[in-house]
Image (spheres, grey):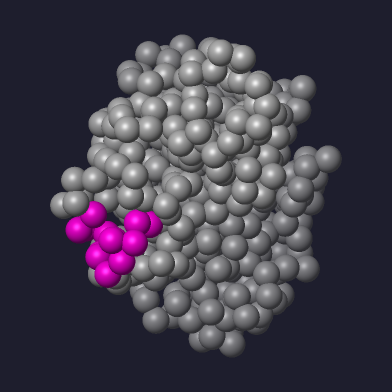
Amino acid sequence: MDIRDPNIDTPLDWTYKGLAPEMDGLVVRQLENLRLSLFDDRLLFPVAVLNDQALHDNSQWMRRFLALTGVDIAPHGKTTMAPELFRLQMEDGAWAISAATAHHVRAYRKFGLSRIFLANQLIGAGAADWVIGELREDPDFDFYSLVDSIEMLEPLVQAVRRGKLQRPLQLLIEVGMQGGRAGVRSVEAGLKIATQIAQYPNELALVGVETFEGVFQMATDGEARAYRMIDDVAELARACDQRGLFRERIILSAGGSAYFDFAAGKLNQHGLSLPTQVVIRSGCYLSHDNGMYQMLVRNLLERFPEAAALSPSLTPALQVWAQVQSRPETNLLICAMGKRDVGTDAHVPKLIAWTPAGELLPHPAPPDYEVTSLNDQHTFLKCPTDSLLRVGDYVGFGVSHPCTTFDRWRLLFRVDEQYQIAGAIRTYF
C-alpha cells in the first residue's frame, strides 16, 4: 500500500502559516537540508510542531499494546488528516484508517488507502454513489460503514444496484445508548436491522457490530457507561450470531482514545461461533496531548497495569510555539497566539517550555505561569512579578484534545530533540 501526501512534490508557498519566506519554492523533503533551528528568528510565528521521537515512541507503544491484547487498530484519521502520519500508523500495524465523513473517505483514497472504516453512516445519494463507484472500479478497495436504522437500508440497496456493484456493501450495526448520539438503543432494534440486511444478500452484508463509547469520556460516570456500551456490542453480536445473520466472519469495534482498554478486554471475550476480529479506533495516541488525553490515558494505565508496563509510555508530541509580544501589566504576559492557532474546546493550552530570545534550546516552563484566556490571536498568560520571560522570548504550549489544534494548521513542522526542523507534514481538513 503506497500511502503518501499527494502534494509531496508541490512547492511550499506563502499560503502555509508559519513558513519562513526563504522556504517558498521548496518541497517538504528539502526542509531538513536547511539545518534550521525553530528559534533562528526566521520563521513567522506562531508555528505548530511535532516531535519526531515522541511520534515514533507513541506509534511503537501502540504496536506493543496491540501485541499484548491481540486486537487490531483502525485509528481515527480525523485526528490529524495527515497522510504522512497515516503511513507511520499503517507501517506500525494498523489494519485500516477510520473515517468520519464521506469527504474523509475521498481524501483517504487520494492518499492511497485501500482499507477504510467509515465509523459513521454512509448517508446521501452523492456519497453512496461515489463510494460504490470506487468499490466497482477497484476490487482491492475494502470498505466498511455503519447502519442504525432500517430506513437507511433501501437507499444503500438502490445505490449498489444503480452502481452495478458485483459484491455486497459491508455493514456494521452501530450501538448507541440513551443520552448518546447515533446507534440503536436495544438489542431488539439491532436484530431487526440485521434481519432486514439478510434480505439483500447480493447488495448488503452484515459483517459486525460497532459503538463509540467516547461520548461519555468526560462524564462523572463515564467508565460505567462506556463499559455498558461495549458490553451491548457483544450482546448484540451474540444475538445475531445465534440467528446466523453474519456471513463468514465478525468484526467487533469500539475504543476511542479514552477506553480502548475496555474494548480490547471486553470484546475479546465475545464467545462467538465465527472467526472474530476486534478493532479499536484510538486516534489521539499518536500525538497524545498535555491535557484531556493525558488525564484519560493516565486513568487507563491505572486500570490496566500490563499496559502501564509498556515502555516508554505515551508522550505529548504536539506543541504550538509563539512569542511574548507584550507585558502590559506586572503579572500579565500577552503571547502572539490565539484561538485561530490552538484548540480550546477541552482546556486552554498549557505553558510547557520557553526559549529566551537568542538561545536555541528550550528550558522547562517555570512554575506559576497559567493561561487564563485566549482571543483570536492573543493568549493571556498570568505570570509572577519576578517573571523570567521577556518580550521577544519564545513560549511553547502543550494542547488539550489534539484534534482541534491539528485542524488549524495546513502544515506542521517536524522537529528533532534539539528543535532542528527535520521536515513537515501537511493536513487535509
Residue farthest toward the right in the current orientation of the protein: 178
Residue farthest toward the left in the current orientation of the protein: 33
Q: Position of residue 231 (x, y in %)?
A: 66, 31
Q: Position of residue 249 (x, y in %)?
A: 47, 50
Residue 162 lies, with reference to residue 427, above or below; the image says below
Residue located 38% across and 32% down the image: 357
Residue located 42% across and 52% down the image: 44
Find residue 312 and report its image quarter.
top left
Residue 105 lies, with reference to residue 380, above or below; the image says below
Depth check: give the residue in front, 161 or 274.
Answer: 161
Q: Is residue 28 magenta?
A: yes
Q: Is residue 40 magenta?
A: no
Quarter of the image containing the N terminus?
A: bottom left
In this rendering, would 376 be left or right of 353? right
**Can you see residue 91?**
no
Find residue 286 and report its image quarter.
top left
In this rendering, would 229 be left or right of 244? right
Residue located 63% across and 67% down the image: 122
Counting labels gives: 0
Residue located 44% across and 67% down the image: 15
**Can you see residue 392?**
yes
Write down the region rendered in magenta: 19-31
In this rendering, would 370 be left or right of 308? right
Depth check: give the residue in front, 291 or 335.
Answer: 335
Q: Position of residue 127 (x, y in %)?
A: 60, 75
Q: Position of residue 3 (x, y in %)?
A: 30, 61
Find residue 23 and report its image quarter.
bottom left
